[in-house]
Image (cartoon, grey):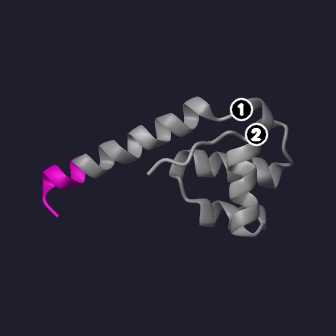
Amino acid sequence: MDKEKMEEWIERFEEARELRRKYADWNFIKSQPERIKIALEYYVETGDYRGAAQMAEMAVDEFVNIAKEKAKIPTVD
């Protein structure tokens, strides 16, 4: 992968993180039990819903539902 492609990917990841940060319901996230709060924060920063679900000790679909519906974290492609 050349340098230009790498920079493009980094820019996309940063833009996605900013969108997740902007639209997340931080009051909801901060009100959650510690394990879920940390998992939601990790998901906002990385977009890694599988890893976040593992941290929260939840099924992936259950975690994604909470992240999208309750915490208002957008899915960014």
What is the quadrant of the N terminus in the image? Answer: bottom left
Mark 2 highlights which residue? 29
Examine the residues drawn in magenta and state their main secondary structure.
helix
Residue 77 picture location, percent across and down? 44, 51
The vertical placement of 31 against 57, above or below, is above
Disc sitting over residue 26 in the figure = 1
Pointer 1 with pointer 2, Cβ within 8 A: yes
* Label 2 environment density (alpha carbons within 10 Å; few <14, some 14–19, many ≥20): many
Q: Which residues are magenta?
A: 1-7
Residue 56 picture location, percent across and down? 76, 61
In the picture, measured across the screen, residue 75 lies left or right of residue 56, that is left
Residue 9 picture location, percent across and down? 29, 51
> From mark 1 to mark 2, how far is it between C-alphas?
5 Å
In the picture, measured across the screen, residue 77 lies left or right of residue 43, that is left
- Report the amino acid beneath label 2: Ile
Residue at (14% x, 50% y) in the render: 4
* Label 1 environment density (alpha carbons within 10 Å; few <14, some 14–19, many ≥20): some
- Name the element at disc 2: helix
Exactly how many numbered labels are in the figure?
2
- Name the element at disc 1: helix
Residue 4 painted magenta: yes
Residue 26 picture location, percent across and down? 71, 32
Residue at (13% x, 59% y) in the render: 2
